[in-house]
Amino acid sequence: MHQDHRTAGAAHPADREPTLFEWAGGAPALQRLTRIFYGKYVPEDPLLAPLFANMGPDHPERVAAWLGEVFGGPPAYSERYGGYTRMVGRHLDKALTEEQRARWVQLMCRSADDADLPDDPEWRAAFVAYLEWGSRLAKENSTPGARPPENMPMPRWWWVCDAYPDARISALAPPEHEEGDTMTPPAPDEPLSFEQHVKPLFREGDRRSMRFAFDLWSYDDVSAHADAILARLQEGSMPCDGAWPAEQVAVFARWVETGKPS
Ligand code: HEM
């Protein structure tokens, strides 16, 4: 049973996106992940077991600290375990094969399931993207004779293409009844303004869904993109959970025609 990461283990200030570290559930969650990976899967895997036969007892904690730092958590690996130089040094001359790399990624994903890490599309996309990137670097660095650049900064990973958890309405979410539903339509000859008549047409969920591109509650953003927004409203493809009634589209169209007053 996966916990709801929108409410549990993902405390983050409401005025910004959560980090991948926060969304994962912080250090305890990443430690669960690496303990399962190195404790359960690696020892029984013929490709990986020999590679880690002599690892130190704190190896799972070290890799969890690395992941936490890369995912926007505290700089635990840099401060306690040796930072970038140490990590790169541990892969040198290991001559990792593609089969070993792919197995490493596959079993990390399986461990993430076992460790009850978030399974939402956004977090998993970012997680897998990092595992692919990092494991391919580890393999490259492990090639005998490879000369990885020295003293590089720690990588910082982020949501893929800004697809963060609140950026869309889940197809499984219950229907929303929000402020937009109850807007009183203006009289036909009443002058329109963005604040009074247009902004209230957009629900909080609409705003969230579009935040990757622009802010539907910002006059500047909506007026800059007004033609594109109007086209989507008229064809019924926005909002994605159901087209607006014609009167609402007409209010937006009239606001555009009358010079987009603020
Ligand atoms: C995103 C990808 C990866 C990350 C983040 C990562 C992370 C790390 C870190 C932080 C260390 C050093 C721990 C320490 O001693 O302080 C390490 C060591 C090591 N890694 Fe990786 N690694 C990755 C990919 C891989 C892959 C694909 C393999 C092999 C298939 C691999 C094999 C090893 C080995 C053999 C060591 C040395 C273990 C020992 O101390 O005996 N790593 N890794």
Image (cartoon, rainbow, N blue to C red):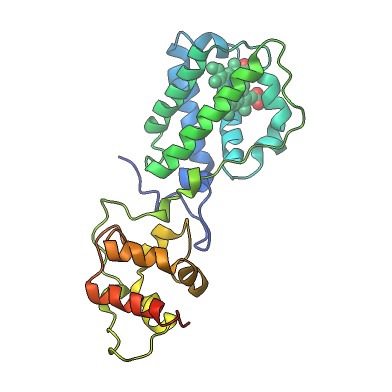
Res 257 → quadrant: bottom left
> In the picture provided, is 52 more to the left or to the right than 206?
right
Q: What is the x, y in percent for residue 162? A: 49, 49
Q: Is residue 55 among the parts visible in the rendering?
A: no
User: Where 216 falls versus 78 (above or below)?
Assistant: below
Q: Is residue 69 among the parts visible in the rendering?
A: yes
Which of 194 and 143 lies nearest the eye of the viewer? 194
Q: What is the x, y in percent for residue 121? A: 38, 42
> In the picture provided, is 12 more to the left or to the right than 228?
right
Residue located at (71% from left, 15% from top): 146
Residue located at (53% from left, 49% from top): 19
- Outermost residue on the right side: it is 151
User: Where 63 falls versus 182 (above or below)?
Assistant: above
User: Where 98 falls versus 76 (above or below)?
Assistant: above
User: Where 44 falls versus 116 (above or below)?
Assistant: above
Q: What is the x, y in percent for residue 254? A: 35, 80
> In the picture provided, is 208 more to the left or to the right than 95?
left
Res 58 → quadrant: top right
Which of 164 and 61 lies nearest the eye of the viewer? 164
Which of 234 and 149 lies nearest the eye of the viewer? 234
Res 97 → quadrant: top right
The quarter of the rendering in which ligand 1 is drawn is: top right
Quadrant of the snapshot with the N terminus: top left
Task: Count up the numbered dots.
Answer: 0
Residue located at (39% from left, 58% from top): 209
Q: What is the x, y in percent for residue 34? A: 50, 28
